[in-house]
Image (cartoon, rainbow, N blue to C red):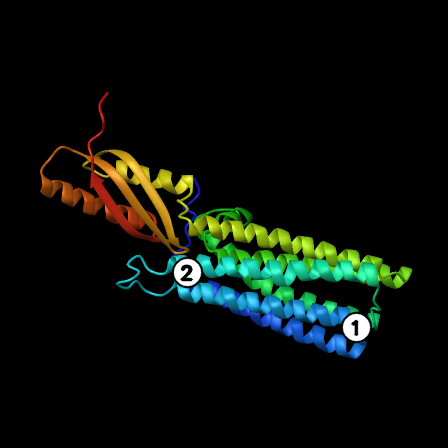
Amino acid sequence: MDAPDVTTANEGGESTLTVVVAGAANLAIAVAKAVGGILAGSSAMLSEAAHSMADTITEVLLLTAVKRGERPADDQHQFGYGQAHYFWAFIAALATFTAGSVFSIYQGVHTIIEGEEAGDYLVSYIVLAVAFVIESISLGQAIRQVRGGAKRSRMHPARYLRRTPDTALKAVAFEDSAALVGLVVAALGLVVTEVTGSGLFDGIASIVIGVLLAFVAVTLGRDNASYLVGRSAAPAVQDLIRRTLNETPGVDDVVMLYTQHLGPHELLVAAKVDFTDTGSDDIERTAENAEQRLKEAIPALREVFLDPTPRRTQ
């Protein structure tokens, strides 16, 4: 059986590094595209530079998500600030959609309707090649973190990435993958445009990139929204919680179980438990033992609330 799909606390530093690497990569790509656009006299490449700068802003928002979500609990936020992670990651998804997808589709439609000179193709190819290398480095860092988390959770990396509550990691992996695909599409558009002499294909490539970014943005936005409104733990995690409680000496049955992600590294568990009919002191010791067993089974578990509740008899 797979291990719980709850990101452990020691992955917070890895997420920070992954986002910082992605942000630095996008900034470097923006500079490369800007230089290429100036040298080639290509407004399209300059537009791509603006697009990469928008991606850099997205990474800044993701870094804000990681750092805000790691703040300790206080009197006003007694369960901590983990939900801030999902709020800022949701804003980053919106930025990807507005600054990336909408702009790319607009640029593609504008190129198809108005036409546009591509400038020096050689410079454009060099810039795209440099951008591909830099994006690959950024994606490599994300893949290393995904593989590490998948190994700890005994999952396939693709499944881990799909199920991890660390949406900042998911955003970097998805956006870098989309960026690499987008660079290939852009290169193909340039090649066909150079061969045919028609800017139509360059415009179509830009629209395809915009649609791809829209898909990524909607997927990430929906994922973060789900956690913001109180997403419960995965069925496998809930099964593990029930099994751990039921195997605790002094517990007869788990009457009701409630779970909620407080953040990428924190999970809340509340349960109505039918304890063996003994004295209150025994129930307290059993509850303490059950909580300890749960935290050993799920390191990311932050809060446990057990309410003694007898089973309903028919």
Secondary structure category for the residue under label 1: loop
Q: Which residue is mark 1?
A: 42
Direction from residue 265 to residue 254 in the image, left or right = left
Task: Check the picture and name the quadrant holding the N terminus.
Answer: top left
Q: Quadrant of residue 244?
A: top left
Residue 66 shows up from this direction: yes
**47 left or right of 7 in image:** right
Residue in the picture at 73% in, 72% down: 46
Can you tell which quarter of the image residue 106 is in?
bottom right
- Image coordinates for residue 45, horizontal then vertical, percent: 75, 70
Estimate the x, y position of residue 75 in percent, counting from the top left. Answer: 26, 63
Q: Looking at the image, which is closer to me, 43 or 159?
A: 43
On the image, numbered disc 2 is attached to which residue? Answer: 84
Q: Amino acid at mark 1?
A: Ser
Image position of 247 (left or right of 164): left
| Amino acid type, callout 2 | Ala
Image point (71%, 69%), residue name:
47
Q: Secondary structure at mark 2?
A: helix
* 225 or 259, nearer to the observer: 225
Distance between the alpha carbons at the discs numbered 2 and 1: 40 Å
In the image, what residue occupies the spot 20% across and 35% down? Answer: 309
At which x and y percent is residue 80?
Answer: 33, 60
Say if 259 sits above or below 194 in the image. Answer: above
Residue 37 percent location from the top left of the image: 75, 75
Marks 2 & 1, CB-CB < 8 Å contact: no
Looking at the image, the residue that sits furthest to the right is 196
